[in-house]
Image (spheres, rainbow, N blue to C red):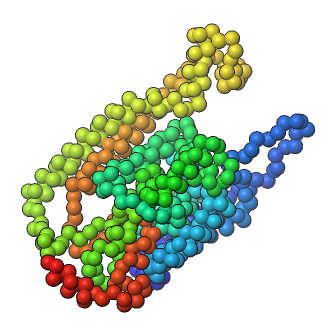
Amino acid sequence: MIKILTKKNTIGILFAGLFLLACVAGALALERFPPPDFDTDHTLPVQIRPAARGEHWAWIDMGVLLVSLLAGTVIVLKTRSRRAMVWLSLFAVGYFGFFRKGCVCPIGAIQNVADALAHSSLVVPLVVLFFFGAPLLLAVFFGRIFCGGVCPLGALQDLVLLKPLRVPRWLDTALGMFRHVYLGLAVLFAAMGASYLICVYDPFVGFFRMNARFHIWVLSGLFLLLSMVVGRPYCRYLCPYGALLCIFSRFSARRVTITPDRCINCGLCREACPYGAIHPSTITPDAPPKAPADSLVRLRRLILGAGLVAVLGYVGWETGAAAGPWFSRDHFTIRVAEKLVAEETQGFEERSFETQAYLDQGLEPETIYQEALLVKEAFTRGSRWFGLWVGLVLSMTMLSLLQDRPRQEYEADKGACLACGRCYASCPIDERNFQGDFDVEAFEAEREKAG
């Protein structure tokens, strides 16, 4: 492990890990009182969410996550073993998936953090902050290690992948924007106090908990079937936490390197990657290195890029404001106010359960109308920022398609690489995989002969 870390990065990770573990000590809570035992014929409903666990389990979960992340880092950057990553994936599915039933989940923790930032009265347990922040912190240094074999959702999709289909780059890029949109929506709805979209529509929660509602079972089955032919569709196109990891991993000091010393541009690693995360070399005998653009051309590109960001950002800002009232209909206060208006105007003889419960508090209908107006105004303000976020994502995605950085060899994209290790097993000059069976000199001579 020491060989793959610089001294500065090692000290930084140690201090960060100690800080997170020390903070957790003051935030763990224990369910101390059992549910009251009422002497009635009432039958408690089936519990969908997992029950709260003891304090010692929280410590165990944090320790397992930390050890798993460190193990994934060693596997990806040191041992470079696909087989070891498969074993780590099986462990993650068994422990974080079926045993822990997908909770605490770094993906769902996005909503807890957004809700706490929007409402100062809410406090996020530091154990949740640890699960939310530890994979992001590691991504800054070493890329998406969490996605490689620690995330149970991603590991499950990776294990069932049989014969992946190659998704065209333009389609893969376009679908990849949905995860950023989903991230914005999840933050907006959580911050406005409406709902936790990620938890409601988690496609694998039913598979892990074995007691989900029917529509979640259907969603889980569809995603599992799709994962057999498309590499990790949820991770690549819908996972909001994957969108954050993609952004953070762009700044990683170290990343997945396909070859241990030199690349022969055989292209086997790209064929082995089911996620389209490996870009080929741009320097070939038929395509010599391009001369760098002069300062005037670079300035022109910069102005056009800034203009595109400004235009799409403004369009998104205004579109988000228009969509705010429509988004607000997911809020409980808005739903009750709309039902109350319908009952008042149409003269319903019986009240709905929600409106009757509200009126039983002795409040006037005008009160909830004022509350609903405030909720709509808050949603309009929040939706503006959501629209701006979508505009920035769209503009940056378009700019990334127009740029093609010169590469000397096949490289794994920092943001798109999921650290699964398949490219390691396909590299013919890595002795740990092929053990000298591949004749590099003969391959290069044959390639030169073919022109």
Q: Is 382 left or right of 290, judged from the image as shown?
A: right
Residue 116 locus on image (x, y percent): 55, 46
Q: Quadrant of residue 370?
A: top right
Q: Is 334 left or right of 356, judged from the image as shown?
A: left
Residue 240 locus on image (x, y percent): 46, 51
Q: Is residue 282 above or below residue 331?
A: below
Q: Nearer the viewer, residue 111 or 82?
A: 82
Q: Nearer the viewer, residue 422 or 241?
A: 422
User: Quick check: can you spot residue 10?
Assistant: no
Q: Quadrant of residue 383?
A: top left
Residue 283 locus on image (x, y percent): 18, 72
Write the residue at 66% across / 53% down. 209
Q: Is residue 322 above or below residue 265?
A: above
Write the residue at 55% across / 69% down. 89
Q: Is 361 left or right of 118, judged from the image as shown?
A: right
Q: Residue furthest right?
A: 39
Write the residue at 24% across / 40% down. 311
Write the residue at 26% across / 50% down. 398
